[in-house]
Image (spheres, helix red, strand yellow):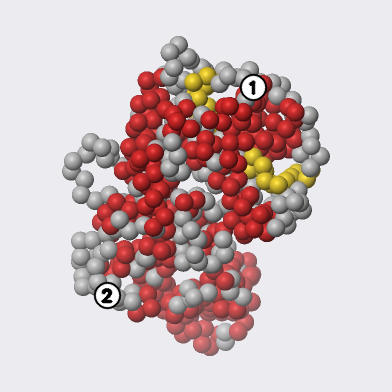
Amino acid sequence: ILDAAALALIAGVGWAAVRRYLARPWRLRGKTRPEDLWILLVLGLIGLTGLATEAARIAMDGRPSFEVWSFAGYYLSYLVPSTVAAGTHQAMWIAHALTFIAFLVMLPTTKLRHALLSPTNMALALRDRPKGAMREMPNLMEATDIETVGAARVSEFTWKQLLDTDACTVCGRCTSVCPANYTGKPLDPREIVLKLGEVAAASGSPAVSSPVGVDAGITVSSDSVFERITAAELWACTTCRACDEICPVDIEILDKILDMRRYLALMEADFPEQLGSTFISMENSSNPYGMSQQDRAAWTGALDFEVKMLGEPGVTAEYLYWVGCAGSFDDRNKKVTIATARLLHEAGIDFGILGWRELCTGDPARRAGNEYVFQQLALQNIQTLADLGVTKVITQCPHCFNTLANEYPQFGGDYEVIHHSQMLMRLIEEGAIVPKANGSRTTYHDPCYLGRHNDEFDAPRGVVGAVSGEFVEMERSGSNAFCCGAGGAQMWMEEHDGKKVSMERTEEAVATGADQIATGCPFCFIMLDDGIRELGVEEDVVVKDIAMLLAEGLDG
């Protein structure tokens, strides 16, 4: 067994050396340091000196027949003359012991520490909240003793966020799937973790030593993470959660980015210019579009039936249909709203809407760091739903879905929230809606806030499969899907660096040869629809929400 273990160790070191120095993946380039070579040398020497010690011992003992079971050491013993076997054994034993001691010294002082801390991090990674929810904050409308919102100094991060920095294996998987990094933006998720770790190690919190030089000779002069992390990196994030999802050791990168955004937005007022007008619109008009609340239900005029308006005298319904801002004000997404309402009506679902009483859930503000505006809107919505006795909610927007289901409970708003894809699939399975296949070749784009944030991949595919002649997947789909580029309040910001994230995803969708791109998110709908127009293929490819695809069968 020891022989097999030693050979496996030597083979592993050899493979690691080839991968590190000869056939290096791009995500490891720029991250190879002198200590990496020393680590490989020490690990390799542990295996080699172990085998050499065993071979010398067997030679010293006269090679008894039973030692043949030590298949490596036995045959290597023939390389050790019996006249020097005793001295060789002693020398190799000392060398093996010293090498192992060197390994023990390197274990906590180099990147090898992740061998201990990564399993620890994974064991402690049990979240106290749904993965789609941001870290809880006190009620800012009532709190009077809050000095800092978000995190900027090492002491303002949680112990788990700091443990993440030591558990990181520097593998770069997070960077390889980051849509912002992939399209040439300044964000590198791995660097966010490493830079936080550098500041923590260099400054201490409270300071336990003088600041020291860190990576590439950079000097840290305080315990503020903004010594190393720039605002541009943080504002490039689409909050798609691909980095967290792929991390093999359960490091939570997105939480760190969002906490730093909170600090920038509320403590420094340091945010992209476009977000300023978005925040004002959300405060003054209760929606990021700056539209009149009185127009929220204008889309109902296109229906041939009456929609219940919850809040009016004597009006009740089993389900609240939460339309969302895009579904209420964006012309393209009004078609989705109308299609969803028609399908619910056709299936006999008892539903109503809030109309002007519905405010933005606050998701864009919270993801952009403005916790204050988010809480203003959230608390008003929660009070409205409580007054109306709402317990069941249907929505077509994954961002509304995530906020209502996962974040409103932080403030006492607990509901059964159903994404329209889940409701429509249920109605198909129950026979309340009979889908009609349209014969088209269709691909489906996974919205990040429905998929990775809430693990719903099957229901929308079920709906698309029921109405499509042929269903084709994109290369990056399901939990590995590429973001549309609108999340994390990017919908309200301009992209200035690199390629548009939406164009990268649109090109991938068009490459499938599909003539229809289906999705289940209003923001994805807008980004992909803009993408096909920018590519000039709108005559050959159309973007539709799954509700639109299903509702077309009602007219057939």
Instruction: List the residue tagged with mark 1.
Output: 304
Question: What separation in Å lies between label 1 and label 2 (alpha carbons)?
Answer: 71 Å
Whole-percent x and y of residue 49? 50, 77
Q: Is residue 124 above or below residue 292?
A: below
Q: Quadrant of residue 284?
A: top left
| Residue at figure coordinates x 79%, y 37% from the top left | 438
Q: Nearest the camera: 547 or 314? A: 314
Q: Quadrant of residue 117?
A: bottom left
Name the spot of residue 354 as percent of width and height, x first.
Answer: 46, 25
Q: Dot 2 corresponds to which residue? A: 212
Residue 220 shows in this picture = yes
Question: Residue at (47%, 27%) from the top-left corner?
Answer: 355
Q: How many marks?
A: 2
Amino acid on which the number 2 mark rests in the picture: Val
Q: Indicate left or right for 506 with 400 as reference.
A: right
Judge by depth and name the residue closer to the eye, 458 or 94.
458
Q: Nearer the viewer, residue 171 or 44?
A: 171
Mark 2 falls on what kind of element?
loop
Residue 113 visible within the image: no
Instruction: Looking at the picture, tell me which residue is in the foreground, 520 or 200.
Output: 520
